[in-house]
């Protein structure tokens, strides 16, 4: 799948128009609701999405068998978890996977606050999420990785809707945000990063 094909797929499956504008978390209003979980639910798009995220981050990944990958793909939220898993499946010799639950009130011993999956302590972590609106989720992931003894080397988001806010917020934490696609509010379309529709 080419990047343009993935953008077309996400545009068809993940953007919903609303007559009444709603308030965006990053400020401003929109009539376009983005639910990338719907587009990513189609299995054939997960591996290409993972590949484009790795490419935009400029990560070199091991493609030959190793005893154990030293890098962990970590996601937060429903689609972030799915993308972290997709990275481990698409690049089995490069990534282990984990997901973070940032709900501190969740006392479930099996799925409560913290990481579930690979241990991040002493490992390089690639933070992934499907969409950035303010960067809050990825900033929480950075803090969780640091608390757990890992090193978040960089982060990637499939679609940025923050107009630079997420990159700025992560930059303040010393983390570079890599962006595959942006949402063009005027056109109501997901487009390759740096390209206006």
Image (tube, rainbow, N blue to C red):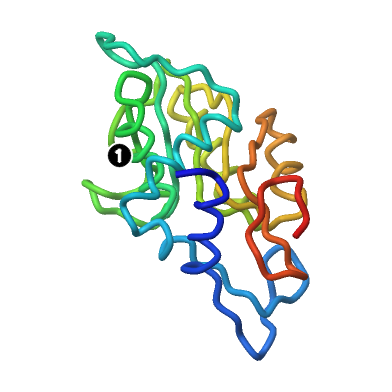
75 is higher (above) or lower (below) than 160: above
Q: Where is residue 71 in the image (x, y as percent from the top left)?
A: 41, 20
Q: Which of 194 and 93 is in front in this view?
A: 194
Residue 91 horizontal side relative to residue 30, left or right: left
For the point 42% across and 32% down, the residue is 73
Residue assigned mark 1: 116
Disc 1: CA contacts within 10 A as few (<14), some (14-19) or many (>=20): some
Q: In which quarter of the image is residue 169?
A: top right
For the point 76% across and 54% down, the residue is 163
Q: Which of 120 and 157 is in front in this view?
A: 157
For the question of whether residue 134 can be seen, the reply is no
123 is higher (above) or lower (below) than 158: above
Q: Position of residue 88 (x, y in %)?
A: 33, 31
Residue 21 horizontal side relative to residue 58, left or right: right
153 is higher (above) or lower (below) than 7: above
- Secondary element under disc 1, as helix, strand or loop, is strand
């Amino acid at each position: 799948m080419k990047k343009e094909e993935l953008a077309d797929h996400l545009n068809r499956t993940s953007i919903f128009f609303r007559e009444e504008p709603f308030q965006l978390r990053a400020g401003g209003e929109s009539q376009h609701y983005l639910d990338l979980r719907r587009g990513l639910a189609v299995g054939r798009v997960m591996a290409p999405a993972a590949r484009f995220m790795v490419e935009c981050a400029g990560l070199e990944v091991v493609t030959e068998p190793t005893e154990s990958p030293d890098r962990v793909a970590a996601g937060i939220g429903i689609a972030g978890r799915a993308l972290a898993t997709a990275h481990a499946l698409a690049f089995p010799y490069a990534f282990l996977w984990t997901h973070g639950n940032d709900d501190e009130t969740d006392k479930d011993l099996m799925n409560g606050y913290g990481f579930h999956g690979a241990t991040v302590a002493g490992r390089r972590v690639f933070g992934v999420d499907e969409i950035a609106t303010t960067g809050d989720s990825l900033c929480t992931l950075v803090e969780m990785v640091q608390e757990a003894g890992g090193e978040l080397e960089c982060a990637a988001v499939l679609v940025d809707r923050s107009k630079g806010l997420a990159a700025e917020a992560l930059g303040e934490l010393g983390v570079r945000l890599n962006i595959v696609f942006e949402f063009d509010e005027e056109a109501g379309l997901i487009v390759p990063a740096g390209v206006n529709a």
